[in-house]
Amino acid sequence: MSNATAAGAELATRWKVWLFQQILNHNTDSLTERFGITEATAMRREMLDEYRTLIPQVPDIGGRRNPLARTLAMSAWAVALYRVVLRHGGTAQDAGDVLHRYLQTTVRRIPRPLRFQALGHHRARVEKMARRSQQRRYPADWVGQIVDGTGQPFDFGIDWTECGVDKFLRAQGAQEFTPYICALDYVTAEAAGERLTRTKTLSWGCDRCDFRFTHPGAATSTWPPDFPERTCGHPTPDAPQPH
């Protein structure tokens, strides 16, 4: 690696760490409520250290050419958060609470008339992502197929049979936390004014993540999450654990 390339990589790492630090500084009140100010402050420092080690482990899925690359990169924040919370005696739900509050605060800053454009699932964009995914150029990437909504109670959908976040968290031994990341989809759908229904996710060991979208519509994000996907579309009183 040339000196210029190494310097560029170091600058990019510093930027990513700085951005994560801003998120932790302004969106982790729940840590203070749960652990107290002294311990929460120490935890934030540990999360930054943990995140630094994770940055080079995030797989390449095409960089800026792939709109899902940012989602995958942000999953490293989630892993760092999750690991430190567990280290301090917390739970996956405690870590999920931080993410839930952060995203709710973030999306509510977007003016309501602009939210669907910024957060919603536009069919043309989703179709493009699905077509691109079928090339299977990157093993760590998503793979999905569009679902037509003609004659169905939804406008359109997408079935993801492979998910980059699910793969990354499994590789990091953090698959217990993946359903809490999946639950954030309902936060963005609610803010975008679209209806999202889903009966399966890969994080619960199902064969796919079956997103179905309708706009305009209403989605509800709950805390703690209801996890409607935990039975993989089969009504059963026995809810499995994340696989």
Image: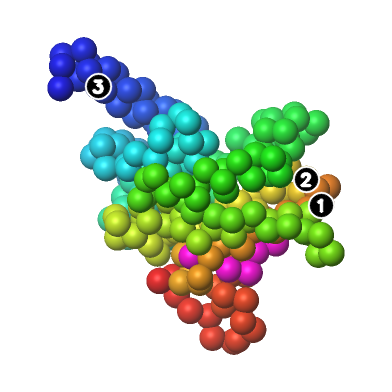
Query: What residue type is disc 1 on?
Result: Gly
Q: In this view, does 113 lie above or below 46?
A: above
| Mark 3 burial class by Cα count in 10 Å: few <14, some 14-19, many 20+ | few
Residue drawn at the location 63% of the way across and 69% of the way down: 199
Q: Is residue 24 above or below residue 167?
A: above
In the picture provided, is 166 more to the left or to the right than 53?
right
Q: In this view, does 4 lie above or below 197?
A: above
Q: How far apart are marks 2 and 3 (CA)?
A: 40 Å
Question: Which residue is most to the top?
Answer: 4
Determine whether label 2 and label 1 are within 8 Å by CB: yes
Q: Is the magenta stretch mostly helix, strand or loop?
A: loop
Residue 142 lies, in percent from the top left, at 47, 51
| Mark 2 burial class by Cα count in 10 Å: few <14, some 14-19, many 20+ | many
Disc tally is: 3
Q: Quadrant of the C terminus?
A: bottom left
Give the residue number, with chain letter if any, for mark 3.
Answer: 10
Q: In this view, does 21 lie above or below 230?
A: above
For this rendering, which residue is in front, 81 or 144? Answer: 144
Residue 72 lies, in percent from the top left, at 43, 43
Q: In which quarter of the image is the N terminus?
A: top left
Q: Is residue 219 visible?
A: no
Residue drawn at the location 57% of the way across and 48% of the way down: 130
The earlier-in-sequence mark between 2 and 3 is: 3
Q: Give the range drawn in magenta.
A: 197-202
Give the residue number, with chain letter if any, for mark 1.
Answer: 217
In the picture provided, is 81 more to the left or to the right than 215?
left
Residue drawn at the location 48% of the way across and 36% of the way down: 66
Can you tell which mark lies on residue 193?
2
